[in-house]
Amino acid sequence: FILVPAMLYLLGMTTQVVVGTSLFQTLFVTATATMVHATTTKAVDIVLAVLLLVGSVAGAQVGARFASKVKPEYLRLALAVIVLLVAGRIALGLGWRPDEIYSVELS
């Protein structure tokens, strides 16, 4: 959340490099967290984890190809919008709690 703007504006990295670095970092951190969670709680669905991993790798490939064809200015704008949306979602989560946190209801 903070790394992407920092790499773009403080370190002056190109947008394509920032996108790739962010995806690699996310993959590494989530894989490590999944393995730690699996070994400590024995409660990780391996099939689901593998499906998510395959989807992430495929999505990273598509995203990398897309990023190489889009102007860096548009990528920066898209990343800024994503950061603002995530910030808004986090802010909403700070003040609002659902009635049932362990159930999903579709209306």
Image (cartoon, helix red, strand yellow):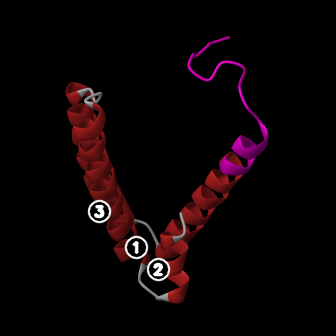
Amino acid type, residue under disc 1 in the picture = Val
Identify which residue is drawn at 72% across, 20% down: 99
Task: Give the CA distance from mark 2 to mark 3.
Answer: 14 Å
Q: Nearer the viewer, residue 99 or 7?
A: 99
Which residue sits at x=66%, y=18%?
Answer: 100
Residue at the location (33% across, 70% down)? Answer: 21
Q: Secondary structure at mark 3?
A: helix
- Residue that extends furthest to the front in the rendered view of this protein: 40
Please tell me in which quadrant of the rendered image residue 39 appears: top left
Task: Locate residue 77: give its quadrant.
Answer: bottom right
Amino acid type at circle 3 is Phe
Question: Which residue was labeled with disc 3?
Answer: 24
Question: Looking at the rendered structure, which numbered label has been put on residue 7?
Answer: 2
The boundaries of the magenta stretch are 90-107
Which of marks 2 and 1 precedes in the sequence?
Answer: 2
Q: CA distance from mark 3 to mark 1?
A: 10 Å
> What kind of secondary structure does the magenta stretch mostly adopt?
loop
Q: Residue at x 42, y 84 (%)?
A: 13
Please, what secondary structure does the residue beneath circle 2 have?
A: helix
Q: What x and y, as percent, mark residue 59?
A: 31, 47
The vertical placement of 70 against 102, above or below, is below
User: 99 or 27: nearer the eye?
Assistant: 99
- Total number of numbered discs in the rendering: 3
Q: Identify the residue under disc 1.
A: 18
